[in-house]
Amino acid sequence: MTGCAMRRVFLAGDSSVTSRQRSFAPMAGWGQALPLFIHGADIINCARAGASSRSFVDRGRLAWILREVRPGDLVLFSFGLIDMKPDEGRYTEPFKEYQGFLRGCVDGVRDRGAHPVLVTSHERRVFDAQGNLRRLLGVYPLAMKEIAAEKCVPLIDLNEWSVRWWRRAGPRGTREIFLHLDPGEHPNYPDGAADNTHLRAAGAIECARFVAAEMRERSMLEPGRFADLERARFPEDEVEWLDDHMFDELTRNRTLEVVE
């Protein structure tokens, strides 16, 4: 995966990965923060809030990537947070449809000479009464690991890394990682927020740092394309949020009609 022509990184996933619009700040996905650590490469974030592996395929978002991707490109897939929800049109059984859709993603990318990478989803912030972290994603990370082994696909285990971080931070510390805001703390959330699924920018930055560090370790891009992985802190405002009209335009345009 070290060819000099590899300068594009596509991201496919759900709200944990997507680039948020400015009206949602300080909520951010880790894909939104990835450009802080990867320079000289075009990061094309196709992840969408509410997407499962099933709906990403069914709504033509994978088809758009497969049309645009070129030999040598990287495509990172991260699904699971929405796959586990019982919504019609989104839910997948971990060792049945979920794995089937992941196989289709991997095969489609490889058929076009590009390189798939699987990234397990970060865990939610849910602690029991004794302060123990609950692993609500269950076996979805394991199901993805099975596909990575079956297909010989590089896997970045963001889930396991996040579990260790959430446990160290505990119920109180993770409030700074996730979108927990007091009333009046941010103009976009005048009534405050208590969101145990979505990250604020500080959390997204650290998840992106981990993903980029794993990419560097596996030589997925040339070493010179990685930057600031050892930098201690980033202000939240170094993350770029999309203008709302640009977000809407990208949502509309990065999809193709799927022909049955």
Image (spheres, grey):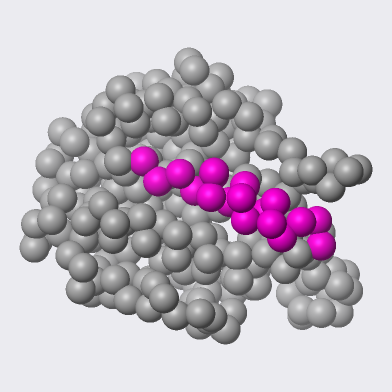
The extreme left residue here reads: 4
* Side of 32 relative to 244 (left or right): left
> Residue 162 colored magenta?
yes
Q: Position of residue 238 (x, y in %)?
A: 51, 82
Residue 137 sits in which quadrant? top right
Residue 102 sits in which quadrant? top left
Residue 40 visible to the viewer? yes
Residue 19 visible to the viewer? no
* Side of 42 relative to 2 (left or right): right
The extreme top residue here reads: 96
The residue that appears at 39% across and 72% down in the rendered structure is 229
The residue that appears at 25% across and 31% down in the rendered structure is 152
- Toward the viewer: 182 or 153? 153
* Side of 135 relative to 234 (left or right): right
In this picture, is 33 found above or below 140? Answer: below
The residue that appears at 45% across and 44% down in the rendered structure is 157
In the image, the segment drawn in magenta is 155-172
- Toward the viewer: 100 or 38? 38
- Toward the viewer: 184 or 169? 169
The residue that appears at 38% across and 78% down in the rendered structure is 228
Q: How many labels, in total? A: 0
* Side of 215 relative to 145 (left or right): left
In this picture, is 162 found above or below 203? Answer: above
Q: Position of residue 124 (x, y in %)?
A: 68, 46
Q: Position of residue 224 (x, y in %)?
A: 20, 73
> Residue 19 colored magenta?
no
Main secondary-structure element of the magenta-colored stretch = helix
Q: Quadrant of the C terminus?
A: top left
